[in-house]
Amino acid sequence: MSLVDSVELAILNCIDYILNTINGLHVPIIWAYEGGPIPDEPYILLNHISGTQDWNPYKSDVDTSDLTNYPDGKQTVFWTAENQVSVNAYGSQCEDYLNKIIYGLFFETVDQFLDKNGVSIVDMGDIKNVSILLDAQAEKRAAFDLRFRIGLLMIDSPGYITGVDMTRTITE
């Protein structure tokens, strides 16, 4: 599973936990994929809008204290990225579903779940009514944007220098 897949899964599971476990609802949650199946209303659609990476990750010194498990040394690399997801609710109670998500993000159990998955909420936008008229019928939809930061801790084995021979012979 790639990093993007694991972060998407963590966000989806978090929103699923808030709506369907804490609030006892049974609302399908999907990611926006063109041509993918769309469930009957109500449902939540998540759309990954943007992401930025930290190109200056923290790198520790190479640790050589455990050469049995890390024969080339061990270096800890901590990397972060910030992402934005649009959270869209469809159906007659779309604003209510989004309010439940926003309020649920403040629950301690949700915060612990996000921490465990290396995700922290940075910012939330306002809920906007973005309903549209399709074939003389209104499609009731509301949305808000959710910005979050992810942290990834990786272990590298870059090798190390055991020693340098500094002797030199000068000949004339």
Image (cartoon, rainbow, N blue to C red):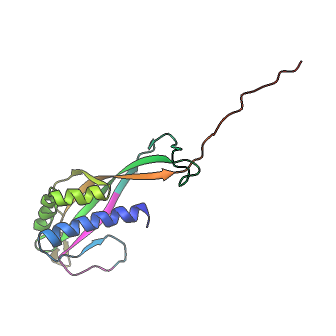
Q: Quadrant of the C terminus?
A: top right
Q: Residue furthest top?
A: 172
Horizontal side, residue 146 vs residue 67: left or right: left
Looking at the picture, tell me which residue is in the foreground, 146 or 90: 146
* Quarter residue 106 falls in: bottom left
Quadrant, the N terminus: bottom left
Specify the segment rendered in magenta: 37-49
Q: How many marks?
A: 0
Residue 140 sits above or below residue 170 on the image: below
**Where does residue 161 sit, x and y in percent of width and height?**
63, 40
Q: Looking at the image, which residue is at 16% across and 56% down?
A: 108
Res. 43 image quadrant? bottom left
Left or right of residue 68, residue 141 in this image: left
Q: Position of residue 125 (x, y in %)?
A: 20, 53
| Front residue of 92 and 147 | 147
Rendered location of residue 20, percent (x, y): 17, 73
Residue 114 visible in this rendered orientation of the protein:
yes
